[in-house]
Amino acid sequence: MRSCALGLGALLIGLAPVADAHFQLLYTPEAALKESAAVPLALVFSHPFDSGFTMNMGKPEAFYVVSQRGEAERKTTDLMQYLEPIQWAGAESKGAAYLAHPPRSVTRSLGDYTYVLRPAPYYESNEDKYIQQITKTMVNIGGLPGAWDEPLGLPVEIVPLDKPYANWVGGVFRAVVMSSGKPVPHAEIEIEYLNHEPQIDAHRFDPEGKATAPQDAFSTLSIRADAMGQVIIGLPKAGWWGICALNLDDNLKFQGKELSLDAVLWIKATEMKK
């Protein structure tokens, strides 16, 4: 079974060890900003928990941000012009990745901003198939909630039932896995903690991890959505967690080979302090 990666499950239907987890990162340091600011982003295809092999990304098919205060006020801003190709270093290798530094004008208003990345399909030679992970990361400006729980109409997506940017450590996060606008019963889910902090200016992961797994099964956790496509995961540690729903369309091909179309959502947990 191939990995995408992050988390701890409240719907733990069989934890299983997974080797060589793949996960599309769409990283920014902060998810909840007090005021308008430029939001830097790192687009990296790697292994979030172990900071291992970093895969080469091709040029994304789409990269944009949706500002939301409800469907009537939804605005989409294309961010492809801000992509900067770089080499990103993991513990074992470097790989082609991208940075983006959109100007502050993109996030000048209060509310929710959902960043969406549709990367180029990645050929996984070990499985002789392609992987494409449509990824979302949400940022809030100033505490004014927007339409954080609204689907964006993507081919596949994980739709939050809780704010992705406002979660306390020790709580749970809920979401629904969707394909073609419909919930996916019993979807296969992988969860992984972003254990090595991305250092955007240095184009690498911090070599020092924040947690140690007692054995390989804890690096990537595997759960199933319920019969309504809902996923519930626990948040035991502060930082970014990624949720990946695997192979949500069984009939896709790319260049004559199987294409696994996955949905990824990044969420952030915050420690409650005095």
Image (cartoon, helix red, strand yellow):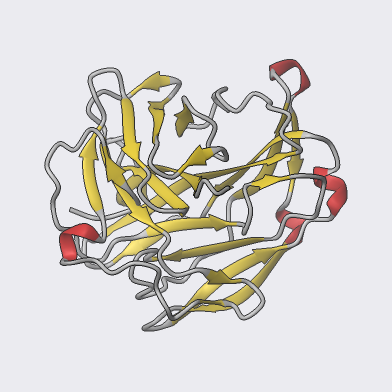
Observer-nearest residue: 132 or 87? 87
Left or right: 86, with 240 as reference point: right
Q: Tell me: residue 209, above or below residue 184.
A: below
Q: Residue furthest front?
A: 274
Give the x, y percent position of residue 94.
46, 81
Residue at horizontal 26 percent and vertical 56 percent from the top: 220
Q: Which residue shows up at 45% across the image and 20% down it?
A: 181
Q: Position of residue 180 (x, y in %)?
A: 43, 24
Vertical side of 170 occupied by 241: above or below: below
| Left or right: where 60 falls relative to 124 | right
Number of dots carrying numbers: 0
Q: Nearer the viewer, residue 220 or 214?
A: 214
Vertical side of 57 occupied by 274: above or below: above
Residue 35: which quarter of the image? Answer: top right
Quarter assignment of residue 208? bottom left
Q: Residue at x 22, y 67 (%)?
A: 126
Measured from the top left, where is residue 273 in percent x and y? Answer: 55, 49
- Vertical comparison of 161 with 93: above or below: above
Question: Whole-percent x and y of residue 232?
Answer: 32, 31
Q: Is residue 258 left or right of residue 161?
A: left
**Residue drawn at point x = 73 percent, y = 55 percent:** 39
